[in-house]
Image (cartoon, rainbow, N blue to C red):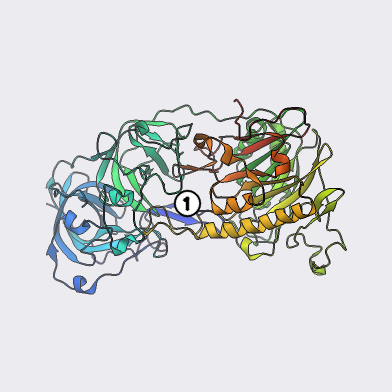
């Protein structure tokens, strides 16, 4: 039988297939697919070997001996010989194999990845014996917080014949089911020991299947295909709770939904699916781990059928109602394809029924990601407003404060910002007010001409509160905004009634947190404390407005990147603001879908003076569930009856479609 050898194979000489995450501070890490590029930068490093094992004589072993009932192999660093297996899948730097004679311990995996450096000359169904050294490879690097993958760095692979590939393990109600809520019980680093319980812990469940073939029957998508990944539930989601009203699955504190199975396109392309789309029949692949999540890598592109999920649209505002909305532009710039401008315009005109005021995030400067010193965004704004008009919308205007170059977080060079789109044909007027000289004695004179670093203050305007400048930034020099966009306050009047609106985009939840399926359990979430600090700064500004007029009309709107029950959102609620998403039924309380987990991360909050008026809030599901939209967030909208002609509606009620 043929054989081949690879000597000195290690991950420090080659980048294995995987996903690299890029992006500046303050932005979610953005996936960029990479494939087996020799000589590329290292994304992961093997764990150190144990000297006593590393220098021991090579020993015969089977796959389950190498895997062990733990997250780290008991043979880590050991040289092993004649490890038998059947090849199940092949990639550019190695192959997966599975032991045809499993032991009787469900906690030990019978599959493993064999790292060969270059593409091996084996095919599925080859019976092989492998010599090599056991290692733990950590995709994403030593500081990623993710788990390692147990593998054998081969020094020799001998093909001994052809045989039947072992049957895949069926996942789902008719086979073995992942735990439904617990990722990992206990606290600490799971790689340093502790109880290993695949029946109770989702992290251990998938570790016990690492490298093995699994099968899913009639899977349903609970998130859209993004960056080559597709989150699904087997058996059409049978027996799974916490579902959204449109077919997704809700993430809650303490329940990260370990029953989700993430398909990955490493071995075969995946179709672009939306929430509710189906994969009829069998989807077969191997279990792998990469960058914070266990994944199933299908060996063949699965069949699929459309579920027909519609994009939602809200009703138009009535006379006397002011409509205030939020929307993320997905980092829009003149370099963005025209169809993306058309999609955003469609969301504003058809989905949101052309609101009076829109709090916007994710608008880039005129050169996009080119780090060329450009800060102005007038060309981006002009293209967006033109697209809105072409979609049948009204004439919108734009207000924002230009940031200093590379001082506001996000991809370097793009200078993303928050701002306001508004229309003036229904009674809204944006108050344009430069700094009022002489009213702010403690403001550094040198900064009066630079609104990017000058703080807006609450001041008396007639019998209520207004702003010292409009638009103006809230505490832009405060360190809590390092690496993120600074929040923007704007003063508007609606048919003569004054309203202060704050648009914000807080520190993203994916920036520095441990992954849900990482080595530290429960995951550490330092970004939540950063958002808590940001919330307290905004809350302080709201209180300053209330100090001028306790009945002032205040709206806080935007991508706050945390849930209604979180400390950051509650910190704002303590000022008397009401968080409108919290009033929706749970099945509709989500604005973002991340790897299949649906959460409410975008908010509109109203002061008591506005909450007491008739109002109607809606999350308009148009983006987060659809593969053709780069953004993961849905727009939101509130209509407030300031005419006083209608009886107050139930807060949080969702209008008919």
- Quick one: SS at disc 1? strand
The spot of residue 513 in percent (x, y) is 47, 58
**In the picture provided, is 67 more to the left or to the right than 147?**
left
The spot of residue 69 in percent (x, y) is 22, 56
Q: Quadrant of residue 217?
A: top left
Q: Quadrant of residue 487?
A: bottom right
| Residue at the spot 57% in from the left edge and 30% down from the top edge | 312
- Quarter of the image containing the C terminus? top right
Residue 152 visible within the image: yes
Q: Is residue 80 above or below residue 358?
A: below
**In the picture provided, is 544 more to the left or to the right than 268?**
right
**In the picture provided, is 241 more to the left or to the right than 198?**
right
Along the viewing direction, whichever of 81 and 111 lies nearer the viewer: 111
The spot of residue 17 in percent (x, y) is 36, 54
Q: Quadrant of residue 273?
A: top left
Residue 116 visible within the image: no
Please give the residue where the numbered disc 1 appears in the rendered image: 31
| Residue at the spot 44% in from the left edge and 58% down from the top edge | 514
Along the viewing direction, whichever of 585 and 71 lies nearer the viewer: 585
The spot of residue 91 in percent (x, y) is 30, 50
**In the picture provided, is 38 more to the left or to the right than 440?**
left
Instruction: Estimate how packed mark 1 is, as few (under 14), some (14 to 19) or many (20 or more) residues with alpha carbons within 10 Å.
Output: some
């Amino acid at each position: 039988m043929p054989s081949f050898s690879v000597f000195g194979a290690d991950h420090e000489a080659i980048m294995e297939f995987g996903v690299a995450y890029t992006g500046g501070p303050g932005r979610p890490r953005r996936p960029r697919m990479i494939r087996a590029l020799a000589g590329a930068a290292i994304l992961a490093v093997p764990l150190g070997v144990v000297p006593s094992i590393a220098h021991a004589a090579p020993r015969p072993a089977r796959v389950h001996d190498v895997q062990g009932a733990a997250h780290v192999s008991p043979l880590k660093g050991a040289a092993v010989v004649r490890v038998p297996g059947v090849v199940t899948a092949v990639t550019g730097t190695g192959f997966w194999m599975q032991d045809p004679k499993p032991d009787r311990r469900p906690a030990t995996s019978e599959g493993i990845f064999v790292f060969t450096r270059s593409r091996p000359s084996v095919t599925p169904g080859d019976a092989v014996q492998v010599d090599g050294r056991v290692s733990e490879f950590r995709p994403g690097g030593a500081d990623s917080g993710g788990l390692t993958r147990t593998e054998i760095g081969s020094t020799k692979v001998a093909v001994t014949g052809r045989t039947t590939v072992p049957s895949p393990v069926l996942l789902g109600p008719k086979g073995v089911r992942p735990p439904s809520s617990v990722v990992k019980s206990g606290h600490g680093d799971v790689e340093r020991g502790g109880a290993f319980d695949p029946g109770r812990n989702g992290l251990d469940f998938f570790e016990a299947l690492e490298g093995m073939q699994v099968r899913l029957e009639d899977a349903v998508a609970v998130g859209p295909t993004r960056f080559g990944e597709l989150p699904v539930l087997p058996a059409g989601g049978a027996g799974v709770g916490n579902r959204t009203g449109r077919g997704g699955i809700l993430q809650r504190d303490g329940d990260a939904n370990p029953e989700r199975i993430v398909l990955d396109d490493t071995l075969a392309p995946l179709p672009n699916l939306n929430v509710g789309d189906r994969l009829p029949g069998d989807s077969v692949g191997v279990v792998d781990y990469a960058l914070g999540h266990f994944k199933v890598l299908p060996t063949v592109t699965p069949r699929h059928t459309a579920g027909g999920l519609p994009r939602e649209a809200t009703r138009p505002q009535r006379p006397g109602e002011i409509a205030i909305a939020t929307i993320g532009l997905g980092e829009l710039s003149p370099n963005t394809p025209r169809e993306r401008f058309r999609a955003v315009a469609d969301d504003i005109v058809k989905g949101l029924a052309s609101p009076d005021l829109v709090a916007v995030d994710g608008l880039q400067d005129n050169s996009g990601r080119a780090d060329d010193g450009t800060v102005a965004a007038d060309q981006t704004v002009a293209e967006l407003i033109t697209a809105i008009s072409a979609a049948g919308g009204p004439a919108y205007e734009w207000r924002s404060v230009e940031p200093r170059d590379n001082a506001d977080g996000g991809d370097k060079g793009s200078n993303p910002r928050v701002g306001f789109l508004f229309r003036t044909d229904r009674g809204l007027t944006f108050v344009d007010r430069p700094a009022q000289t002489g009213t702010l004695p403690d403001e550094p004179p040198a900064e009066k001409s630079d609104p990017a670093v000058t703080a807006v203050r609450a001041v008396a305007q007639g019998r209520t509160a207004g702003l010292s400048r409009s638009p103006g930034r809230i505490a832009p020099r405060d360190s809590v905004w390092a690496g993120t966009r600074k929040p923007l306050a704007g003063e508007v009047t609606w048919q003569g009634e004054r309203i202060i609106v704050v648009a914000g985009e807080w520190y993203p939840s994916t920036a520095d947190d441990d992954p849900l399926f990482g080595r530290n359990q429960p995951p550490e979430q330092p970004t939540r404390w950063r958002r808590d600090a940001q919330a307290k700064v905004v809350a302080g500004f709201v209180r300053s407005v209330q100090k001028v007029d306790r009945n002032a009309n205040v709206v806080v709107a935007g991508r706050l990147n945390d849930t209604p029950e979180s400390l950051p959102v509650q910190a704002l609620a303590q000022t008397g603001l009401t968080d409108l998403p919290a009033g929706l039924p749970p099945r509709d309380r989500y604005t973002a879908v991340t790897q299949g987990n649906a959460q409410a991360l975008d908010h509109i909050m109203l002061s008591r003076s506005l909450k007491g008026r008739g109002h109607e809030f809606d999350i308009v599901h148009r983006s987060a569930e659809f593969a053709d939209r780069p953004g993961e967030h849905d727009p939101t909208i509130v209509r407030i009856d300031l005419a006083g002609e209608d009886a107050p509606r139930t807060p949080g009620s969702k209008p008919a479609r």
